[in-house]
Every structure is written in C-alpha cells, then in structure tokens.
Image (spheres, grey):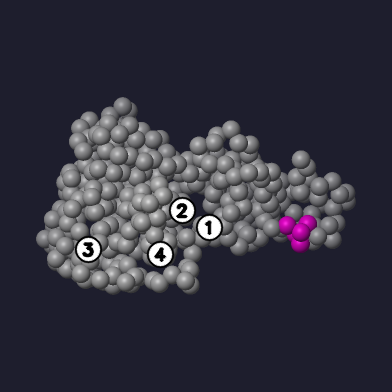
Amino acid sequence: MMLAIDELLRQQPLSSAAIDRFFAEHEFPIVEGRGGKSTVETYDSGPVSVTFVYRGEADGVRLQHFIYGLETSQPFNRAEGGDLWYLVLELPRDSHVQYKLNLQRGEDHRWILDPLNPKRARDPFGANSVVHTDGADRPAWTLPDPEVRPGALQEVSFYSQAFAEERFVRVFLPARARRNRLYPLLVVHDGSDYLRYSSLKTVLDNLIHRLEIAPAIVALTDSGDRLKEYADDPAHARFLAEELVPFFEKEFPVRAEPAARGLMGASFGAVASLSCAWRYPGLFGCLLLQSGSFGFSDIGPHHHGPAYDPVVEFVNGLRAHPGRPSERVFVSCGMYESLIYENRSLLPVLQSTGMDVRYVEARDGHNWANWRDRLRQGLSWLFPGPLWMVYE
C-alpha cells in the first residue's frame, strides 16, 4: 500500500498547489492501514502507519511522544524544496498516543501542540495532542448525555486528628438519591483531577443511567502533599479508615459492609489505595488501582528517586507478606508507560492472596485519558449495576 505522503512526494517538482490539495484532502495525523479492530489480547494484528505533518519554516522538527521504550524525540523529514515536514511511524492498532512537536529555529527549541490536529488531552501540566490509531474518538460514555439525569456534587469538611487540620472532601450523590436507601461508598484519591481530566462525574452519571454500575456515593479526596501522604503514610491510612469512613457512615446513607466499600486511585493514588487496604485488611472490599507507582527493590535496586523510597519499602513488605488486603481488585496499566513492569509484577502477588483480581492493559500511556477510558471496565466489575448482574 502506498502511503498518502509517498503519493504526494512523487509529484516533482512539489508545488504549493499540490501541498494545498494534500492538506485539503486529509485529516492529521494521517492513519493508514486500518483493518478490523483488535483487542489488547491480540498481539499478532498488523500495525498501522501514522504520518505526522508540519508545514512552516523551521531548521528542524521533532516528534516528542510519550511511548516508553521508543526513542522519545524523533526527527521529521523535510520535503525537498518546500516547507513541508513529515514523519511516518508504525504503531499497533488501538494505540492512544499523546505528543507535541518540537520546533527548532537556530539554537531555540519550542514545544507546541500539533496545529493540524484538533484533538487534545489535558492534565495538570497543560495539554497534549492526541492520535488514536483505530480512528475512534473518546468513548461515548465519557461524554455528556442530555438524556441522563445528573447527580450532584457538594463539599463537606471535618476535623482530622490524623493530620491535625480541617479536611475538605467533595461528595458525589447519584441522581434520585434517597435518604431511606443505602448506597456503596467509593473513596477516590486525587478526586479533583479525576473530575477535571477524566470526566469522572460524567462517567458516573452515564454508567449509573445505563444500569452498568450501581448508584454509589463517592468521596472525592485531595491532598496538598500527595507524594508524602500517598506513599504509604500511616497518617493518611488512619485518616481514611478511622475518620473518613465513620464520618460518611454517620452523615450519608452508605452501606456498612466491606463489599460495598471501595478505594480508587491512579499512580501514587493507587499506591495510597493499596497501602490503606493493606494496613486495614478487610475494611475496603473493592480496590481500583490504575497505573500504580509500585516500585520495589527486593530483587534489585529501584531507579525511581528518593520520593519512591517509602513506596518501595511498602511494596517490598507487601511482596513478602501480602496478607489479604481486600476481596476484589481491578488493576489497569498502559503498555506505553514505564510502570508496566511493576504492575505486571504485582499481579501474581495479589493473586496469591486468594483475592479476586482482574487485570487490564491498554496501548496507552501514563495519563488521565487512559485512566478515564478504563473506568467503565473497572467500576462495572467492582460495583455492577442491574445490567451486568442480569446479563453477565
């Protein structure tokens, strides 16, 4: 198959009119070689070609992508006699890649969003351009649906003895919530970021409306010093187990049994979730762990830096004496992130406890879009709604 960029470059001399037609006829980046959709379990499906394009004066253009294991800065080729730059990569199907362009002019280097690609993903550090090799937009269940009756958000606070200060927590209440009905309780680390960058409220509203997850009350927590509090901090575990849970059982209609109580988090938030469940085994019956920063050094030194030292000490202890922190654990991780090794290594440790463990990988990186797109699988398995209880 001849790629679109090859067909253009065969036209010699390459005129501005030909380039204009090329831009008018394509969306960028150009994804070619698509076939039937594959799943992450299908590793023998052929790759697709992705052509990144930039048009403008520059001394050099590079692709800065976030795929661990590939050279992260790759140079574009310049079409002879023009201001057209291009780079062709082969990527597996169903890959979700975030990137920027690095423009060089003299000694100056400037990272920019791809001006030809309107698709963006946002995180606490800004925005990245996005390409998805199967051509699919973000899942429909992550987008606002005018047919869905929304739940409500409110803020509560209480004094924490563990931290010796007032702590504020956002609370999601499902649509049609009633005081005379009891609901599961899900505690979410980095709750504000999940709301802002992973559309968590929209996801909850949609999945509850579709009967895919049970209506639940969700405690959305945040930390001003997450690298300390989330790294197996005993004060943080005490705050969740001995203060937050009793507060919600007193103030909200939540079910008291562990099977209806869950912890959730991504990256260091996943560490905090597992750490708390390990320190208070049996209190939280469900865990949702996304791209956990589960560094360990019992079989060799870790290379994550000093911020990981408390995490490493915790994971080393967990690997030696896992106990039975919970009953059901959903773990997800991206194949394109450096933490894939640690998350894969954690799987047999969790399974050895007798807990019911489900593990999902995606061709994605360490980002909020990846974590958003795995929420349906994780939440519907841990807190199944009537749809799954009938048809699964």
Amino acid type, label 4: His
Circle 4 is placed at which residue position?
A: 209
Crowd class of label 1 (few under 14; some 14 to 19; many from 20; radius 10 Å): few
SS at badge 1: loop
Closer mark to the observer between disc 4 and disc 2: 4
Question: What residue lies at 16% left-to-right and 62% top-to-bottom?
Answer: 249
Question: What residue lies at 22% left-to-right and 63% top-to-bottom?
Answer: 182
Q: Quadrant of residue 89?
A: top right
Earlier in the chain: of badge 2 and badge 3, it is 3
SS at badge 2: helix
Q: In the image, residue 71 lies at what x, y percent?
A: 56, 40
SS at badge 4: helix
Circle 3 is placed at which residue position?
A: 182
Decide whether residue 23 is among the magenta residues.
Answer: yes
Question: What residue lies at 39% left-to-right and 40% top-to-bottom?
Answer: 359
Q: Quadrant of residue 221?
A: bottom left
Q: Tell me how far mark 3 sits from mark 4, CA to CA.
A: 18 Å
The residue closer to the viewer here, 382 or 199, is: 382
Q: Tell me how far mark 1 sits from mark 3, CA to CA.
A: 33 Å
Crowd class of label 3 (few under 14; some 14 to 19; many from 20; radius 10 Å): some
Q: Disc 4 vs disc 2: Cβ atoms closer than 8 Å?
A: no
Circle 2 is placed at which residue position?
A: 373
Q: Disc 1 vs disc 3: Cβ atoms closer than 8 Å?
A: no
